[in-house]
Structure formats: C-alpha cells, structure tokens
Image: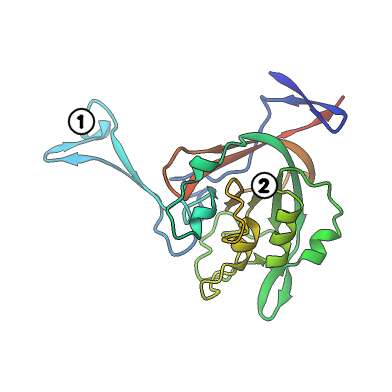
Amino acid sequence: MYIQLGRKGHRYEVDLSQPVDCSSTFGNVMREPRAWHSDPVSICPVKVENWIGSVKEGAPVNFFSVQLNPHGNGTHTECFGHISVEQHKVNDYFKDYHGFCTFVRISSREHEGDRVVFLEDFEKKKLNLAKFLAIQVDADAFPQDFSGKNAAYFQAELLAYLAEKGVKHFITNLPSVDREEDGGTLAAHHAFWNYPSATREEATITELAFFPKSLKEGEYFINLQVAPLHNDASPSRPLLYRLEKL
C-alpha cells in the first residue's frame, strides 16, 4: 500500500509495506537491551494449584504472564510524568502517532570522564527539524546491559534547544538523555519538557531505540506505536518509512 503526503509545498510517496523497525523486542534476549539494573523480561506460564498454563505441560492453551520494566527492558516512550510529582500517564498525552521524522547520527565527545553530545556538534548538522527527531549516538553494541556503564548522554542545552525549535517527540538509542548517575538532577529531561515552569505536556522522549546500520540519515515518515499501558512510560515501536519525493 502506498500513501502520498504533503509538507511545505512538496509531495512525497510512502510505501507502507517497507517499514524500518527501530525497536527492541521484549522477551527476546537477542534484541532486548537492559538498563538501570532491571531484571530481564520474564514470560512464564501461570500456575494455579496443579494446573500449568502451557501446552507442553498438558494445558489446552498457552497462558503466560509477562513481567517487565518499561524504562529498563527495551524501547520505550515516556512523558513528563517520569519526573513529575503527579502520576501522569504517557497515553493520556501522546496523540501524534504519525509525522515527519529527521534521523541523524552524532558522536559523543569525552568530557570530564563522560561521553557527552553537545549542542554545538548538533548545530553543525544544519538540520531542518521536524516534529519528530531521532538521534543515534555513537555505535555501542546492541543489545547490551547498560547498567553501571555510564553511557553517553545529552547536554541539557541541546534538549532545551530542541524544545525551543518545536521538536515534540525525541527518539534516541541511549538508555537515557541524562547521565546515569547525576544526583537526581535529570537536567536534560527537565529542559526538554520545560518542567515545571511551562510543561510541554504532549512532548515525549523515546529511549533504547535500535537503528539498523543500513538506515541512512535524512527525512522519514514515522509511525510511533505506544502500548496502551497506564504508566509514565510504555513499550513502544518506532517505524520509519522512506520518503520518495514526487
């Protein structure tokens, strides 16, 4: 199936049968990164007295329970409820399921023992920003357990700049936009959501995304699927589609 889109006076065609899946797979150790010392996803048959919910164990159906942590087990999308006192839920605010997305790769730089992505390096890309922005930082092995490794993170000024320029949904392969241990400051999260002074309630951050090596920098059409989990963060699936200019 093909669709045609218009943006800023230009027309594009999108082949909906050719998505690039930029998500991990919960419950698949080959495609499941971890962070924040979270346990791996657990998928086990329900046990009720002598009954086990597994066809292998004699049940007529497979009846499994799933235990996971959205922030720590794979690709997830979060709202400002991640840092707010109130319990806000991502699906109460996220409604932009489709849009134009800019994808770019940027290297971090060594800074005081950390790896940081700086605003000045991002500005050198001279991008025409869309509502969605996806950034792959470096090329760390995927999947892996990022716990305790002090992964690269973003300068808070960069996230503040994106908010000022109207980027509404930010996607990255990193486990967090902030330093793993920063004393609870979460400066980049606060800057992007402009919390609490003038909170951008409909803005989201997607972390632990997976960008295939074959994915080229440029503009894409995106379908961001977020599971309807009543939580500040939920497992998600960013799908990118090539734009063919007409």
What label sits on residue 188 in the rendered view?
A: none
In the image as oriented, which residue stretches furthest toward the bottom?
112
* Vertical side of 34 occupied by 155: above or below: below
Residue 83 is situated, as x and y percent measured from the top left of the image, at: 50, 60
In the image as oriented, which residue stretches furthest toward the left?
49
Q: Residue at x 68, y 71 (%)?
A: 115
Q: Identify the element where label 2 is drawn.
A: loop
Instruction: Identify the residue under disc 2.
Output: 168
What label sits on residue 58 in the rendered view?
A: 1
Q: Amino acid at mark 1?
A: Gly
Disc 1/disc 2 C-alpha distance (Å): 50 Å
The quarter of the displayed image where residue 154 is located? bottom right
**Residue 57, visible in the rendered structure:** yes
Q: Residues within 10 Å of mark 1 (few under 14, many from 20)?
A: few
Residue 124 or residue 208, whichever sits in front: 124
* Vertical side of 150 occupied by 16: above or below: above
Q: Residues within 10 Å of mark 2 (few under 14, many from 20)?
A: many
Q: Residue at x 21, y 29 (%)?
A: 59
In the image as oriented, which residue stretches furthest toward the top?
1
Residue 18 or residue 3, whichever sits in front: 3
Colour setup of the view: rainbow
